[in-house]
Amino acid sequence: MGLYMNKLINFIVGSTLILLITGCDDKSISLSEEDYGVLDNGILIKQYIFENDNQMKVKIINYGAIVVSIEVPDKNGKINDVVLGYDSIDGYVQDPSYFGAIVGRVGNRISKGKFSLDGKDYALAINNNENHLHGGIEGFNKKVWTPEITELNGLPALKLTYLSPDGEEGYPGNLNLEVTYTISNKNELIIDYFGTTDKATILNPTNHSYFNLSGEGNGDILDHVLKINADYFTPVDKGLIPLGNHESVLGTPMDFLKPKKIGERINNDDNQLKVGLGYDHNWVFNNWDGTLKLGVTLFEPESGRFMEVFTTEPGVQFYSGNFLDGTNIGKNQKAYQYRSALCLETDHFPDSQNNSNFPSVVLRPGEEYKQKTIYQFSTK
């Protein structure tokens, strides 16, 4: 769909704003808005619905910038929602697992919640044993973001903005973060990040969607076939904090250079798998240079669904749903069981601010934080 051949139409159906972009190929993408739920403090949360002409539908709410659902066809044209989530706002308010959310300021773990920057020591909120995880006690996943329906690269777009004040969860600087969601007629979910700060800080957000290409709540992910373009991963200690080095995947259960079933070696008697209770590690992408590249593919043989992950980030945290235990009651009252979904969190490496040999996550005044990640769905 050509950028300059698109026709942009805004119209109202009832109380719902709809943005429709129609291209010269007669393909269209719509973005609509509707009420989703009300928080205890009376704030109304909105849901935004993307739809294209290739049977893809994506729903996002401005609470936590959460991806509520991704509906895509299988090889026979059957539509399923392929991400875990809840049926109401109450589920997301109470959610302990970060389903679909943008997490930060810093995704993943920070050792003992401490780091030093420009000679000053900072202590962050502790919320994961002795460590800081996914932004702290009330990270970005629990915030109300300011929504704006707009257009990006010729596509309808939802821009969500959050101003994180100086000192929030212990982080320095007033941070302004924009996360913009779009979809394409290539069945891509595109996530663009943009951030600025008025004081030196650290920033490493990511999207925390849980995928099951069979359909959410439909069995485990052990037969999913995974490929990661990474010769190395970052080994971790018992608290899942990186040791600071890169270790070769060759000859280990961490080797996904060629497509392999996730369950093939997940119970291997390997120290790193024992520490992570399965896969819960960062992989170091090959030939990273900050440009958009294919990093991961995921295939579910029965449905034929195939997902490709493109990113500008240097790594991916592959988490195999090891802490799901049936206590998360999700959509249609489904209990999400052990390893019933997986996360592919594209970002900089965990605890980077405490490892000078990892790519930096420092953001300074006058600099711009930018990241792009694309989840593209097809069948084969």
Image (cartoon, grey):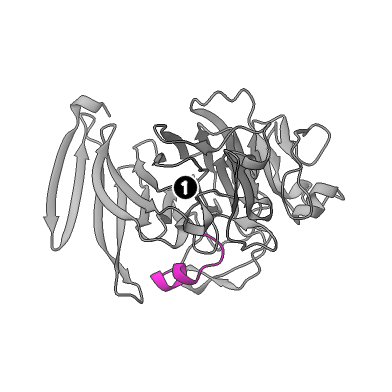
Magenta span covers which residues? 87-98
Is 159 left or right of 204, judged from the image as shown?
Answer: left
Could you tell me the amino acid type at mark 1?
Asn
Q: Position of residue 85 (x, y in %)?
A: 48, 63
Q: What residue do we see at 68% from left, 38% from top?
A: 355
Q: What residue do we see at 45% from left, 63% from top?
A: 142
Figure check: 140 above or below 225: below
Camera sees residue 372: yes
- Pick whichever, 331 or 229, lies toward us: 229
Q: Position of residue 276 (x, y in %)?
A: 75, 53
Q: Name which quarter of the figure residue 261 lies in.
A: top right
Q: What residue do we see at 54% from left, 34% from top?
A: 313
Q: Which residue is mark 1?
A: 76
Figure check: 48 above or below 308: below
Q: Residues within 10 Å of mark 1 (few under 14, many from 20)?
A: few
Please tell me how many numbered marks the rendered image carries.
1
Helix, strand or loop under label 1: loop
Q: Position of residue 236 (x, y in %)?
A: 76, 46
The quadrant in which the N terminus is found is: top left
Q: Position of residue 307 (x, y in %)?
A: 52, 41
Is 187 left or right of 280, judged from the image as shown?
Answer: left
Figure check: 80 above or below 23: below
In the displayed orientation, state which residue is furthest to the right: 269
Figure check: 202 above or below 162: above
